Amino acid sequence: MKKGNCFEANYKALLEKPFDQGWYLCHGVVTGQAGAVKGIRYAHAWLENGELVFDYSNGAIVILPKEDYYRIGNIVNVIRYSAREAMMIALKTGTYGCWDKLFDKYL
């Protein structure tokens, strides 16, 4: 399966958002809905602010209510990182993510 750029794209998008104003970088497991990933569970990243999801993966800009995004992607095992946490972990690991071992089998 060809991998996308969700971890890098959404981390970089987070850095462009107003700091400490409710933005979170999220990592979780989704179920693909179409094409080559249909039915496949994989690790994914997106941003959240309040009840909205913003996904900048693969050059797209998807903005959906959080409830709909989670339902459509059948999302589980979500870890939310504040901008401060995300920056500290990215600097420590030298990567955009995925940072938790929980997701290793979905990469």
Image (tube, rainbow, N blue to C red):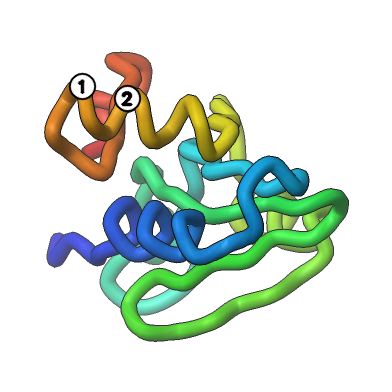
Instruction: State left or right for residue 92 relative to residue 31.
Output: left
As drawn, which residue projects farthest toward the top? 101
Residue 89 appears in which quarter of the rendering?
A: top left
- What residue is disc 1 on? 92
- What residue is disc 2 on? 89
Report crowding for label 2: few under 14, some 14 to 19, many 20 or more residues within 10 A (C-alpha).
some
Where residue 35 appears, as percent x and y from the top left, is 35, 78
* Depth check, front residue: 105 or 28: 28
Quadrant for the C terminus in the image: top left
Q: Dot 1 lies on which element?
A: helix
Label drawn at residue 44: none
Q: Amino acid at mark 2?
A: Ile
Residue found at x 24% / y 26%: 105
Quadrant for the N terminus in the image: bottom left
Residue found at x 84% / y 50%: 50
- Labels 2 and 1 touching (C-beta < 8 A): yes
Residue found at x 43% / y 33%: 86
* Depth check, front residue: 41 or 100: 100
As drawn, which residue projects farthest toward the front? 19
* Depth check, front residue: 3 or 13: 13
Q: Dot 2 lies on which element?
A: helix
Q: Amino acid at mark 1?
A: Lys
Q: In this rendering, is residue 86 above or below 45?
A: above
Report crowding for label 1: few under 14, some 14 to 19, many 20 or more residues within 10 A (C-alpha).
few
Where residue 62 appears, as percent x and y from the top left, is 60, 78
Q: In this rendering, is residue 2 above or below 103?
A: below
Where residue 93 appears, as percent x and y from the top left, is 17, 25
Where residue 79 appears, as percent x and y from the top left, is 55, 26
